[in-house]
Image: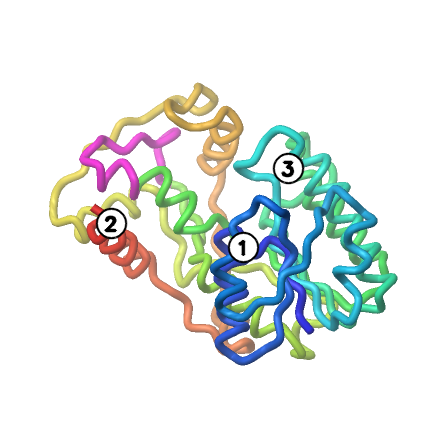
Amino acid sequence: MILVVGATGNLGGVVTRMLLAQGKPVRILARPHSNYQPLAEAGARVAMGDLKDRGSLDTVCQGVDVVITTANSAGRGGEDNPQSVDLEGNRHLIDAAKAARVNHFIFVSALNADPDSPVPFVQAKGKTEEYLRESGMPYTIMAPNAYMEVMVNLIVGMPAMMGQPVMIMGEGRRKHSFISAVDVAAFIVAAIDNPAAINRKLILGGPEPLSFRNAVAIYERVLERKIPIKTLVPGEPFPGLPESVAPILASLDLCDSPIAMTQTASTFGIRLTPMEEVARRTAEERMSSI
């Protein structure tokens, strides 16, 4: 049995559907008011619980061979925050999985995870990595760069498709190995029962490092029109986005984050998705929804 925590989120949902398509038995952790029905209809078994409630996780983990968690507090707020979910919630899950003698724990972290970071979300990811390693359970840590469907779409794709100027923090010329969330899901699924993934941290990126200005050029090809660009001074508020996003964008303008992926992609048999393919898919989905 494979337990997916965070299945009602974007990445967790893709992972769950991939596993179900392979005929794997899947249990998903869900809260009463979450949108778990489509996954249940697809064949996932639903177990009610909450990362913030340690007691609810013991039953959920019973009989589970593999735990996959993509859950995080990003975009939630209120009682769901980096302290309660990304730090304490993940510790609850690790403890419950260890008590249930789970054979493999797969944790989706982040490229910049750091237990000493002043950013609570990033710090919680780093501390969870440490706690998981110390648990003694066989583990795999996935550390992806920023997602094309999230960061690039938020900064470039959405405003471009709405006919608005794209706002870039700083010069926007730093290059990063943005990765498709679908590829991250594929790595997660490929890591199950794979000796190459046991007790390893996998640094994940896309097929090539690209800047935000490169992303604008890609969307110009996809949309077949010029896209105006406006620049913001690093550190100033980013209109229309949560306050927490501005520091992240400012940090992306300070350095490059290229990731050599040829060997890792070959080891796990993953074809990395080019950004233009993601951009075209995103544009098609938007057009079909109008």
Is the C-beta separation of discs 1 and 2 under 8 Å? Answer: no
Q: Which stretch appears magenta?
A: 157-173
| Residue nearest the observer in this picture, 226 or 78 | 78
Q: Position of residue 11 (x, y in %)?
A: 51, 56
The disc label shown at residue 164, or none: none
- Quadrant position of residue 74: top right
**Secondary structure category for the residue under label 3:** helix
For marks 1 and 2, the one nearer the N-term is 1
Q: Residues within 10 Å of mark 1 (few under 14, many from 20)?
A: many
Kind of residue at disc 2 = Ser
Q: To which residue does mark 1 refer?
A: 36
Q: To which residue does mark 2 refer?
A: 289
For marks 1 and 3, the one nearer the N-term is 1
Q: Position of residue 152 (x, y in %)?
A: 37, 45
Q: Residues within 10 Å of mark 2 (few under 14, many from 20)?
A: few
290 sits to left or right of 72? left
Q: Quadrant of the N terminus?
A: bottom right
Q: Residue at x 42, y 58 (%)?
A: 180
Instruction: Kindly report the distance in space between the C-alpha atoms of the residues bearing marks 1 and 3.
Output: 25 Å
Q: Residue at x 46, y 57 (%)?
A: 181
Kind of residue at disc 3 = Phe
Q: To which residue does mark 3 refer?
A: 121
**Secondary structure category for the residue under label 1:** loop
| Residue nearest the observer in this picture, 93 or 109 | 93
Residue 164 lies in the magenta stretch:
yes
Instruction: Kindly report the distance in space between the C-alpha atoms of the residues bearing marks 3 and 2.
Output: 33 Å
Q: Residue at x 47, y 22 (%)?
A: 235
